[in-house]
């Protein structure tokens, strides 16, 4: 599936790729609408409709992922509300073995997430995921999201990776498309980012539903 002999840098998304996306889906689609409905004295369904439109307005931009933006938009303490359900934050079941294999293989492993620094900090606090990575990068430091070519240009300048020897893994097809446009040589999609939802059909990229099928290939070919 992947030419591990020609991969020495691995760029990994966080939510849905290393962490179970169930927390984020539950928070944005159910918990926050419920709390917003309470604050406004409206029905949960009305709150869901209102927030869904707000989400669509900025989808794919850095604002979509910005906790400060949403706190301002709906006048609610988003980070505090996230903590109300932070028991749902967890690694994917297959993530630990995958990350350990990458580390053992000598490859450089970097987290590249659109998540706000506040979200990243909370998830590190709950999962200690930082122990698996050489570096953690929130795209907010570049001012653009992974959907933007500017992000990839700034990231390459900052990190110094060779496109042709880099693997990028994400659960978002539009983001994988952006990485492909930039010229990242090796791409892998995650078909089952949310443990509570069925796997998706993916046609345009190699994909996995369980990283453990990759372990032997990773370890047999050191960077």
Image (spheres, rainbow, N blue to C red):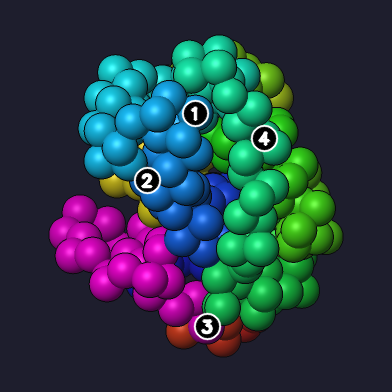
Q: Which mark is residue 39?
A: 1
Whether pointer 2 and pointer 3 mark residues with C-beta atoms closer than 8 Å, the reply is: no
- Can you say whether 75 is above or below 126 in the image? above
Q: How far is mark 2 from mark 4, CA to CA?
A: 16 Å
Mark 2 burial class by Cα count in 10 Å: few <14, some 14-19, many 20+: some
Q: How far is mark 1 from mark 3, CA to CA?
A: 44 Å
Majority secondary structure of the magenta segment? Answer: loop
Inspect this view and state whether residue 200 appears.
yes
Determine the residue positioned at 57% across, 51% down. Answer: 14
Q: Which residues are magenta?
A: 188-212
Q: Earlier in the sequence, mark 1 or mark 3?
A: 1
Judge depth for marks 4 and 3 and give the one in front. 4
Secondary structure, mark 3, is helix
Q: Which mark is residue 212?
A: 3
Q: Earlier in the sequence, mark 4 or mark 3?
A: 4
Judge depth for marks 4 and 1 and give the one in front. 1
Inspect this view and state whether residue 160 appears.
no
Determine the residue positioned at 56% across, 78% down. Answer: 93
Residue that mark 4 sits on? 79
Q: How far is mark 2 from mark 3, CA to CA?
A: 30 Å
Q: How far is mark 4 from mark 3, CA to CA?
A: 33 Å
Q: How far is mark 4 from mark 1, CA to CA?
A: 16 Å
Q: Earlier in the sequence, mark 1 or mark 2?
A: 2
Determine the residue positioned at 52% across, 56% down. Answer: 23
Q: Which mark is residue 29?
A: 2
Whether pointer 1 and pointer 3 mark residues with C-beta atoms closer than 8 Å, the reply is: no
Please state which of residues 222 and 167 is positioned toward the viewer in this rendering: 167
Q: Earlier in the sequence, mark 2 or mark 3?
A: 2
Q: Earlier in the sequence, mark 4 or mark 1?
A: 1
């Amino acid at each position: 599936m992947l030419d591990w002999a020609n991969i020495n840098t691995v760029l990994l998304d966080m939510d849905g790729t290393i962490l179970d996306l169930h927390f984020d889906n539950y928070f944005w689609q159910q918990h926050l609408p419920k709390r917003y409905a309470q604050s406004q004295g409206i029905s949960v369904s009305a709150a869901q409709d209102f927030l869904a439109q707000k989400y669509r307005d900025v989808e794919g931009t850095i604002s979509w992922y910005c906790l400060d933006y949403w706190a301002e938009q709906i006048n609610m303490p988003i980070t505090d509300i996230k903590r109300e359900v932070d028991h749902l934050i967890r690694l994917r079941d297959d993530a630990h073995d995958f990350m350990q294999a990458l580390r053992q293989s000598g490859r450089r492993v970097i987290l590249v997430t659109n998540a706000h620094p506040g979200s990243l900090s909370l998830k590190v606090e709950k999962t200690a995921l930082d122990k698996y990575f050489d570096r953690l990068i929130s795209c907010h430091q570049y001012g653009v999201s992974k959907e933007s070519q500017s992000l990839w240009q700034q990231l390459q300048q900052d990190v110094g990776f060779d496109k042709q020897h880099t693997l990028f893994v994400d659960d978002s097809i539009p983001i994988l498309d952006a990485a492909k446009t930039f010229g990242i040589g090796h791409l892998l999609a995650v078909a089952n980012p949310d443990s509570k939802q069925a796997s998706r059909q993916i046609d345009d990229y190699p994909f996995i539903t369980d990283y453990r099928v990759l372990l032997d290939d990773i370890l047999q070919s050191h960077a």
